[in-house]
Amino acid sequence: MLGNQLIRSGTSVGAHYREAQRARSASEFLSKITVAHQELDETDYWLELLAESGLMPCERLAPLRQETQELLAIITTIIRKRKRTAADAEDSP
């Protein structure tokens, strides 16, 4: 069951990222990339549960968790920059 949840959330990240790349507006991009971030965070949760449950050795999951954290940091930066850009555009005359 945990593995199925991991596959669903993990593959959903890529799908939402791809949708974000095809967004028709800045707000649509932000919406899709935010969902990708949420799915990535959920993926990390399932990886954490797999490790804590003992179903998979922590050593095998460590590289996946590290990559997940790196991707979360990248997407967080993208979201923050886009929000800042949107806020700056609203402040412009």
Image (spheres, rainbow, N blue to C red):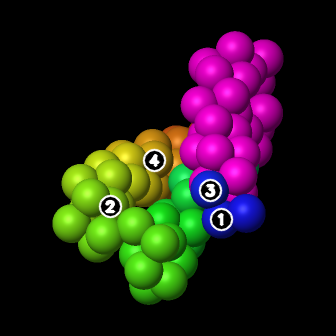
Which of the two discs, 4 and 1, labels the residue nearer the N terminus?
1
Which of the two discs, 4 and 3, labels the residue nearer the N terminus?
3
Identify the secondary structure beneath mark 4: helix
User: Which residue does the numbered mark 4 point to in the structure image?
Assistant: 75
Identify the secondary structure beneath mark 3: helix
Which of the two discs, 2 and 1, labels the residue nearer the N terminus?
1
- Give, as a three-letter code, the residue at label 3: Gly
Q: Nearer the viewer, residue 13 or 64?
A: 64
- Give, as a three-letter code, the residue at label 4: Ile
Q: Nearer the viewer, residue 34 or 27?
A: 34
User: Which residue does the numbered mark 2 point to in the structure image?
Assistant: 61
Image quadrant of residue 12?
top right
**Magenta part of the chain:** 4-33
- The answer to whether residue 57 is left or right of residue 12 is left
| Inter-mark Cα distance, 2 to 1 | 13 Å
User: Which residue does the numbered mark 3 point to in the structure image?
Assistant: 3
* Residue 41, x across and y down, in percent: 55, 63
Q: Mark 3 and 1 residues: CB-CB less than 8 Å, in contact?
A: yes
Q: Mark 2 and 4 residues: CB-CB less than 8 Å, in contact?
A: no
